Image (spheres, rainbow, N blue to C red):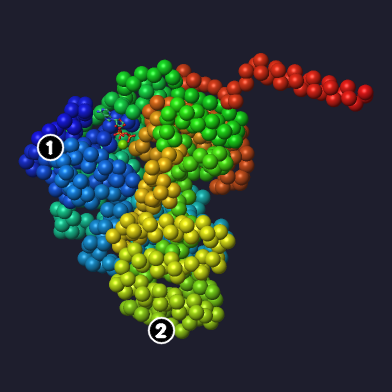
Amino acid sequence: MSTSYLEKLNDRQRCAVEHGVGQDETGAGPLLIIAGAGSGKTNTLAHRVAHLIVNGADPRRILLMTFSRRAAAEMSRRVERICAQVLGANSAAMTEALTWAGTFHGIGARLLRIYAEQIGLGVDFTIHDREDSADLMNLVRHELGFSKTESRFPTKGTCLAIYSRTVNSETPLNDVLRNWYPWVASWEEQLKQLFSGYVEAKQAQNVLDYDDLLLYWAQMVSDPSLAEDIGNRFDHVLVDEYQDTNKLQSSVLLALKPGGRGLTVVGDDAQSIYSFRAATVRNILDFPAAFSPPADVITLDRNYRSTQTILAAANGVIELARERFTKNLWTDRQSADRPKLLTVKDERDQANYIVEQVLANRETGMLLKQQAVLFRTSSHSGQLEVELTRRNIPFVKFGGLKFLDSAHVKDLLAVLRFAQNPRDRVAGFRLLQMLPGIGPQTAGKILDAIAADPEPLMALGEIPAPPKSGQDWGSFVDLLQALRKSGSGWPAEIAMARTWYEPHLERMHEDAETRRADLMQLEQIAAGYPGRERFLTELTLDPPDATSDQSGVPLLDEDYLVLSTIHSAKGQEWRSVFMLNVVDGCIPSDLSTGTSHDLEEERRLLYVGMTRAKDSLTLIVPQRFFTSGQHAQGDRHVYASRTRFIPATLLQFFESGTWPTVSPAASERSANQIRIDVAARMRGMWK
Ligand code: ATP
Ligand code: MG
């Protein structure tokens, strides 16, 4: 059998790929691959999966957890390519069988669906995204009267963030408040009540939020026989970006393979950027000692991604970090060009510069797709988006407001969710209030009435039409009962829901036409899923961007520029990378400078952003930028200075410059011209 795919790997990568393969049970112990950015960790993991399959592992028994579903799909593609070299025609079928690939949340949802009955969950449970969860939190907040009596009670978003942090870090509420939310600590008692109410509401409605997917999973594997049963489904469990897992995630993982056999995790402590979701770098550092004998550790030290000059600058930034485990990388990709550190007047100039530069790169043959613009916060790209739109340059945005967050798409999904689980109050409220004549009170009563019935959608048919709801009530009930009967088939169901929704769309939105196009697109996306339940689950967990290449529809072959938050750029690479607003206040973000721990995380973020670049990197420093939103001062322009993570001692790694570059001769000429014009005007005045 040809193993030519192994020849491209360096010795350590190869060692990681072959670790334990073909040995008996005792040989395939746990493995940690820990290494810096661009050292081929993900690539090595893909080769390992392929190598396992080539050596007879059953792909249906491989569990692969990656950072995003997108990353899992990319991994499957690479695995298929490698397998194809060796196994030929059969390989596609084999890699298609690599079905257990996804995010922790996605895999959790699937396992819970399988074991629902054994752990007392209704099989029809629906999943709330963050916004739905915040809405439910809000409903409970109102019911408890906190929003009325306590005028400065934390917002629904803050309440949810506190709840989520408490759950994910498995830390007592009181510590979470003291450490991260001291300004709301006086509401501890009320928050306790609120969170209990929220948990009860979720249980009564048979809905799970994102955190529940992990919590129930952890609960499930705390039962040794269930844990064993689930663990036995998989011969190999592999995890990428392990530095961004939290305690819950590592505990469910270790419960699957308590002895560590067949377990491989990969990560880089210098890229740990998710502590706001309670991720802890300790997971990766403590991994080896979690087993006896300890896990084997393989480090990689060669970077294959970036030029030497880019790597030197990135290394410079991360070397100033207080604590670090992975060592600096080296590369043999020489380049004469240092990364640019460019000062511009304001965000408009920043946008103009990028557009000019991206087009200039395009002229030299670099596709738009090979270039990316990264930023700390989604709202930073506003000015650039306007400029790109004006100049007709196609772009996609990751990590911003998603297609699925738009009202009309959520409306249509609410129809499906409610049909799936009529106890889901957030979906129910959304839906009922679309009907004329139904407000929150009536909606609440209707939902109470049907929730008490074992067959809620049948019960719905027996409720008399609320006054003023007219014919709309009848067609609503008909629709839901038709959807309830499984006979209608998929994706016909979503077409039915859309037809029902059309008149409401017309009534509620002025730009119904564009919104209709989105819904058609949703229907196309839906056709790619086997059924309603999978569609809802996967969409809620890892929504595709409507205009991205991931949705599988139109844009697939087109060229477009990528705009992304640094968080969403994780694991990816582009030939040319621009970073916006590399100033204090943006990175580190004003909101994160509280503790040195937060600051260190911001430094790692800059490192993650810089290490996405292969050939060219430009950091832009606008002297003025606009901040909005969460600031106490509200929206405002502020004067900015270069990020503190690039102190003067690091300037040697960059080529500093300004834009527009005004040559002294040119500025003199224009100054002279003004003097002449003024003189001419004055002469005209006394002529
Ligand atoms: P990150 O930390 O950013 O996730 P990573 O360590 O996962 O990075 P990869 O994305 O796997 O790194 O690889 C970075 C680049 O290096 C990719 O373009 C990959 O194809 C290339 N690469 C990795 N290993 C080799 C190798 N042995 N020979 C040539 N190119 C390689
Ligand atoms: Mg990677």
How far across and how far down the image is residue 216, in percent?
A: 28, 59
For the residue carrying disc 1, how many other residues have a C-alpha within 10 Å: few (<14), some (14-19), or many (20+)? some
Q: Looking at the image, do the residues carrying marks 1 and 2 touch, with CB atoms under 8 Å apart?
A: no
Q: Quadrant of residue 205?
A: bottom left
Q: Image quadrant of ligand 1? A: top left
Q: Residue at x 39, y 19 (%)?
A: 335
Furthest residue toward top = 665
The furthest residue to the left: 24
Left or right side of 130 for 154: right
Q: Quadrant of residue 275?
A: top left
The location of residue 411, given as percent across then percent down, is: 46, 64
The kind of residue tagged 1 is Gly
Give me the residue at 39% from left, 59% from top.
523
Q: Which residue, given by chain and number where applicable, does mark 2 sit on?
A: 462
Query: Please, is residue 593 above or below residue 227 in the view?
Result: above
Which is more N-terminal, label 2 or label 1? 1
Left or right, residue 478 beside residue 108: right
Q: Secondary structure at mark 2?
A: helix
Per the rendering, the mark at residue 643 is none
Name the residue tied to disc 1.
Answer: 20
Secondary structure beneath disc 1? loop
User: As rendered, which of 70 and 196 lies closer to the eye?
Assistant: 70
Residue 247 appears in the rendering: no
Residue depicted at x 32% and y 48%: 69
Depth order, front residue of 446/5: 5
Can you say which quadrant of the picture contains the N terminus? top left
- Distance of mark 1 from mark 2, alpha carbons? 63 Å
Look at the image and tell me whether residue 496 can be seen. yes
